[in-house]
Amino acid sequence: MVQSRALVIALILLLSTTVPEVHSKSIFERDRRDWLVIPDAIAAYIYETVNKMSPRVGQFLADAAQTPVVVGTRTFLIRETTKLSLLAEQLMEKIKNLWYTKVLGY
């Protein structure tokens, strides 16, 4: 019960603050693959916040993050978002090429 309360308080604190790494630049100003780091930055921020409040709950989160289910899910998400990122980059190149050739006439 105490662990779940500590986790709820940590999540409330997390959601009430901003993560500077996530909001540092506009998506259009940075490399498109930078956004793949956002989930890791959020997870690290959650862990640090929870670990400061309750080291036992922090250790539980660290152990839970190393379970095969979590590691497999994380690997799957990274693989799929990498594919989507590459497709988005190709689409942006095609749109830019169409803009320059058809609209601007270069």
Image (cartoon, rainbow, N blue to C red):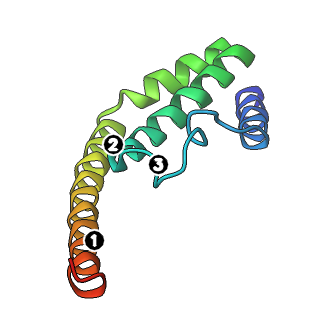
Front-most of 79 and 98?
Answer: 98
Do the residues under discs 3 and 2 have CB atoms within 8 angstroms? no
In this picture, is 1 found above or below 55? Answer: below
Which kind of residue does numbered mark 2 sit on?
Answer: Arg
Residue 89 place in picture, x, y as percent: 25, 60
Front-most of 30 and 46?
Answer: 30
> Total label count?
3
Left of 101 or right of it: where is 41?
Answer: right
Label annotation for residue 63? none
In this picture, is 83 found above or below 60? Answer: below
Residue 5 place in picture, x, y as percent: 78, 33
Left of 55 or right of it: where is 90?
Answer: left
Residue 11 place in picture, x, y as percent: 71, 38
Determine which residue is flagged by label 1. 96
Q: Residue at x 22, y 64 (%)?
A: 87
Other-residue count near label 2 (Cα within 10 Å), few / some / many at <14 / 14–19 / ≥20: some
Determine which residue is flagged by label 3. 29
Dot in front, 3 or 2: 3
Mark 3: secondary structure = loop
Determine which residue is flagged by label 2. 74
Mark 1: secondary structure = helix
Identify the mark nearer the N-term, 3 or 2: 3
Q: Residue at x 75, y 38 (%)?
A: 8
Quadrant into which the C terminus falls? bottom left
Do the residues under discs 1 and 2 have CB atoms within 8 angstroms? no
Front-most of 70 and 90?
Answer: 90
Identify the mark nearer the N-term, 1 or 3: 3
Corner quadrant of residue 14: top right
Which kind of residue does numbered mark 1 sit on?
Answer: Lys
Mark 1 → mark 3, Cα distance in angstroms: 16 Å
Mark 2: secondary structure = helix
Left of 5 or right of it: where is 26?
Answer: left
